């Protein structure tokens, strides 16, 4: 192709291709592959595949270097980058070194960016071959409003014209951060604030604790909930000068090392970690609904001699249940615990004897919920949970009532059936999952009332309560009347 022809062709494509690429970028985000800001990817372009689409998540102020080169064939690659609104952020054909592209992109606003690697002419082109696309995060601008990542340092200036500079960052629940602001010139007396998404100041510092400098530093800031946060870099009094601000993630961040920042878990998930003399417990939290039957397993990992110990607590860290060795060996297990109320609960993974214990090592924590145990029962089945009561009536047309509940081996239950009118001579039977009677009572509650008191369930599973009237030969088998039945769990 002659030079003049190529110029004309390029001008035409310059008008047409960004529009075509825009449509492609909007059509393809669901199929696009993610790419790291510090990484590389290879691809093949030809008649059957004239372009590939990737995406990266960028933060305002970041500077990303792109290097696109052909590594085989006669491929003439071109590069387009669009933001998530479809606006063209970068278009590059040939760099000064020949075919390919080498350029930087400053992220204008936080969001997803779509990268289109194509051959010159796209569907109308005729080159083909392999390409290599390299990305390099070169840093972040020091401009007001730039978004920082952990490990970033920026340089700024505080003056009467610009008395404060703000930066944003994304944080996850459980992150533990250190933010420092060091004077690099002038008389600046640095002052730091961190503001949450609702514009509340959650941390601030003027002079770093334990030092003789005027530098500001916020140590061990625990992020209570995931979201966007703002760092306000300013001054004390009317001082002025330059500064270096650094955002760092501290040791133990995101590991659930404190109850103030537990790691989130959901049913069906597992987590791994390790315990030693410096970190004797790790904290997790999960959302649950009343009646959920949860099982928590804390097992020793592949190294160490950890004697696992697990605790379940409510939202205020009040103990609900704990276990040492109910799992195999020295593993801990809380099986089918019934959640008492809707809310957030905490799991503490620790070791036997906690801070005074001697074992250490890796662990695996698993949280599971038993599927609704009543789901396969007929829809008209009456079900009970501990702490509930029901009313019924026994007569010639309804000689008994059946109620089903789920219990765990070792739970101690009491069931009472109390007459409220008529001459009913109450009688109770408790049946196991095989419909075998495992307990019964006639007058344990006095005055012809029935009571199965402090019965320890032998197995885990479904139990049926049969509420009926006495039918023996030593009394009236045809008594009738209303009753109240109560199912309660007692201490073992």
Image (cartoon, grey):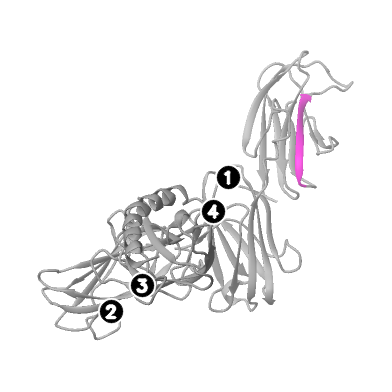
The earlier-in-sequence mark between 1 and 4 is: 4
In the image, 184 versus 312, the foreground residue is 184
Q: Is residue 63 left or right of residue 233?
A: right
Q: At 73% across and 28% down in the image, what residue appears?
A: 378
Q: Residues within 10 Å of mark 4 (few under 14, many from 20)?
A: some
Question: Which residue in the structure is indicated by mark 3?
Answer: 95
Disc 1 or disc 4, which is closer to the eye? 4
Residue 453, relative to residue 335: is it above or below?
above
For residue 461: magenta? yes
Residue 108, relative to residue 356: is it above or below?
above
Q: At 67% across and 18% down in the image, what residue appears?
A: 421
**Helix, strand or loop: magenta stretch:** strand
Question: Which residue in the structure is indicated by mark 1?
Answer: 340
Q: Is residue 135 left or right of residue 398?
A: left
Question: Which residue in the structure is indicated by mark 4?
Answer: 286
Measured as percent of width and height from the top left, residue 452 is found at 75, 37
The earlier-in-sequence mark between 3 and 4 is: 3
User: What kind of element bears circle 2?
Assistant: loop
Q: Residues within 10 Å of mark 2 (few under 14, many from 20)?
A: some
User: What kind of element bears circle 4?
Assistant: strand
Give the distance between the C-alpha atoms of the residues marked 3 and 1, in whole angstroms: 66 Å
The earlier-in-sequence mark between 3 and 1 is: 3
User: What kind of element bears circle 3?
Assistant: loop
Question: Which residue in the structure is indicated by mark 2?
Answer: 208
| Magenta stretch, residue numbers | 460-468
Q: Which quadrant of the view contains residue 219?
A: bottom left
Q: Is residue 89 left or right of residue 444?
A: left
Image marks 1 and 2: residues in contact by CB distance under 8 Å: no
Give the distance between the C-alpha atoms of the residues marked 1 and 4, in whole angstroms: 14 Å
Disc 3 or disc 4, which is closer to the eye? 3
Measured as percent of width and height from the top left, residue 470 is found at 81, 23
Query: Can see residue 445?
Result: no
């Amino acid at each position: 192709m002659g030079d003049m022809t190529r110029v004309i062709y390029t001008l035409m494509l310059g008008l047409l291709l960004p529009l075509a690429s825009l449509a492609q970028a909007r059509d393809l985000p669901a199929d696009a592959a993610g790419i790291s800001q510090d990484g590389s990817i290879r691809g093949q372009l030809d008649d059957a595949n004239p372009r590939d689409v990737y995406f990266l998540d960028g933060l305002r102020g970041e500077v990303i270097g792109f290097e696109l080169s052909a590594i085989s064939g006669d491929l003439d690659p071109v590069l387009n980058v669009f933001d998530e609104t479809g606006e063209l952020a970068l278009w590059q054909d040939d760099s000064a070194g020949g075919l390919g592209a080498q350029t930087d992109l400053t992220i204008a606003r936080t969001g997803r960016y779509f990268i289109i690697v194509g051959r010159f002419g796209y569907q109308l082109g005729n080159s083909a071959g392999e390409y290599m696309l390299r990305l390099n995060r070169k840093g972040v601008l020091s401009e007001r409003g730039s978004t920082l990542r952990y490990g970033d340092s920026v340089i700024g200036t505080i003056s009467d014209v610009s008395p404060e500079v703000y930066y944003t960052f994304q944080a996850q629940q459980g992150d533990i951060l250190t933010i420092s602001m060091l004077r690099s010139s002038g008389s600046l007396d640095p002052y730091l604030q961190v503001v949450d998404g609702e514009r509340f100041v959650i941390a601030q510092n003027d002079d770093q604790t334990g030092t003789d400098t005027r530098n500001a530093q916020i140590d061990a800031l625990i992020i209570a909930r995931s979201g966007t946060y703002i760092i306000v870099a300013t001054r004390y009094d009317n001082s002025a000068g330059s500064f270096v601000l650094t955002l760092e993630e501290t040791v133990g961040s995101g590991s659930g090392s404190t109850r103030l920042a537990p790691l989130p878990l959901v049913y069906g998930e597992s987590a791994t970690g390790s315990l030693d003399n410096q970190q004797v417990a790790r904290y997790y939290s999960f959302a649950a609904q009343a009646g959920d039957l949860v099982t928590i397993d804390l097992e020793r990992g592949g190294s160490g001699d950890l004697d696992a110990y697990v605790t379940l607590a409510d939202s205020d860290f009040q103990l609900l249940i704990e276990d040492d060795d109910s799992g195999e060996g020295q593993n801990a297990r809380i099986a089918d615990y019934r959640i008492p109320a809707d809310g957030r609960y905490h799991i503490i993974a620790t070791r036997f004897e906690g801070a005074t214990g001697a074992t250490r090592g890796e662990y695996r924590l698993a949280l599971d919920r038993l599927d609704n145990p009543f789901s396969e029962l007929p829809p008209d089945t009456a079900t009970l949970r501990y702490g509930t009561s029901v009313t019924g009536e026994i007569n010639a047309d309804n000689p008994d009532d059946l109620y089903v509940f789920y219990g765990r081996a070792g739970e101690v239950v009491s069931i009472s059936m109390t007459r409220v009118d008529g001459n009913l001579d109450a009688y109770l039977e408790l049946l196991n999952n095989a419909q075998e009677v495992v307990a019964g009572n006639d007058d344990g509650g006095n005055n012809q009332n029935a009571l199965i008191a402090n019965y320890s369930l032998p197995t885990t599973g479904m139990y049926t309560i049969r509420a009926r009237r006495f039918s023996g030969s030593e009394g009236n088998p045809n008594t009738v009347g209303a009753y109240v039945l109560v199912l309660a769990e007692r201490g073992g």
